Amino acid sequence: MVQIIIPVGPNDKVDWVKRSVNSALSQPVDKVIIYDNSERSDIYNLFQELKDKLVYIKDKRMKRVNMARLRNKMLSLIDDKYVIMIDSDVVIPKDYANKIISKLENGVAYSWMHYAYSEEEIKKPLSLSENNPNLGCAGLNLEIIKRIGYFDERYERDEDVWLYAKLKKIGYKVEPAEGRCLHLNKVHARLDFSSSIVEARRNLWRSKYDIMLIFDGLTDFTFLTGYSYYGSYYILAILSAIFHPLAFLYFPLIGYGIYYYKGPKKYLLNLIPGLALAISFPYGLGYNLIQKAK
């Protein structure tokens, strides 16, 4: 009735892959499938040792990474109604798949677990403002995904947000399950300056997908709040250059950020990616206008 599928790529760490796969094997599901396009002998050897416990599919490495296309390939391998996708750097706690399965059996088309970045955070309750859909620890009703024509492959890197927005607009239920999966890659947590810079570089191209959602009529405005908040830093800088007293408005702006992120350190580590996201808005708009004109 339920299958788990895990994609394994060329840059994945073997230790992380082992932990992810072992966590999947501990779940009460019918089958665990590995989709391996890494073309790496060490990863291949790992799965030869586990071949009696899972289904191993080997494929060629993608010339250009397109996560939407990759997930469509993965879904073509599933023959059950429900599928749980686990990324190879994510650990799902024992029996937590039941939480996702319960959501799917109760009419939810797409359910995910938010991430924890330490063992201590796994049981941390969800906050009301927490709404970050992902496909690294998520369950899908495959019948519904087929009905909408699978993933739109134009959304090469933001396929999770596209799926959330698409299903929600049509009227399907999309919501998180209780609990958290452990993300072994802490870059996304923005715990230090280097990971903050990595996220900032990622945000410089992310805007093209956010604007694409607007053009496609799929915008969920909760995902655009970052543009308004961080964009106000640039707007206020321009206005302050014209009328200097307006610079005092930075105090409540920064104060809100510190309050939201619960401290100055986390605020600063999120400020860098946020400013990168806001300044990339013209690029995202230009990219989509050019695509529409073609």
Image (tube, rainbow, N blue to C red):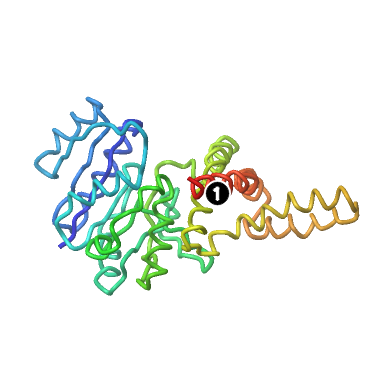
Does 3 sit above or below residue 277? Answer: below
Q: Name the residue at the left extreme.
A: 52
Across and down, in percent, residue 222 comes to: 54, 64
Q: Nearer the viewer, residue 16 or 75?
A: 75
Q: Residue at x 30, y 69 (%)?
A: 103
Q: Amino acid at mark 1?
A: Leu
Q: Quadrant of the N terminus?
A: bottom left
Residue 266, position in %: x, y?
Answer: 62, 49
Secondary structure found at label 1: helix
Q: Position of residue 15 (x, y in %)?
A: 31, 34
Quarter of image, res 107: bottom left
The vertical placement of 16 against 162, above or below, is above
| Left or right: 237 as drawn, with respect to 142 | right
Residue farthest toward the top in the current orientation of the protein: 41
Within 10 Å of the Cα at label 1, are there few (<14), some (14-19), or many (20+) other Cα atoms? some
Q: Residue at x 26, y 38 (%)?
A: 18
Residue 181, how many percent across, how many down?
37, 54
Q: Quadrant of residue 142?
A: bottom left
| Image: 44 above or below 50 | above
- The residue beneath circle 1 is 289
Q: Is residue 229 left or right of residue 20?
A: right
Residue drawn at point x = 43 percent, y = 50 percent: 158
Q: Is residue 259 above or below residue 273?
A: below
Residue for point 21% across, 62% down: 82
**Number of callouts:** 1
Q: Is residue 275 left or right of residue 28?
A: right
Position of 117 with respect to 277 (left or right) is left
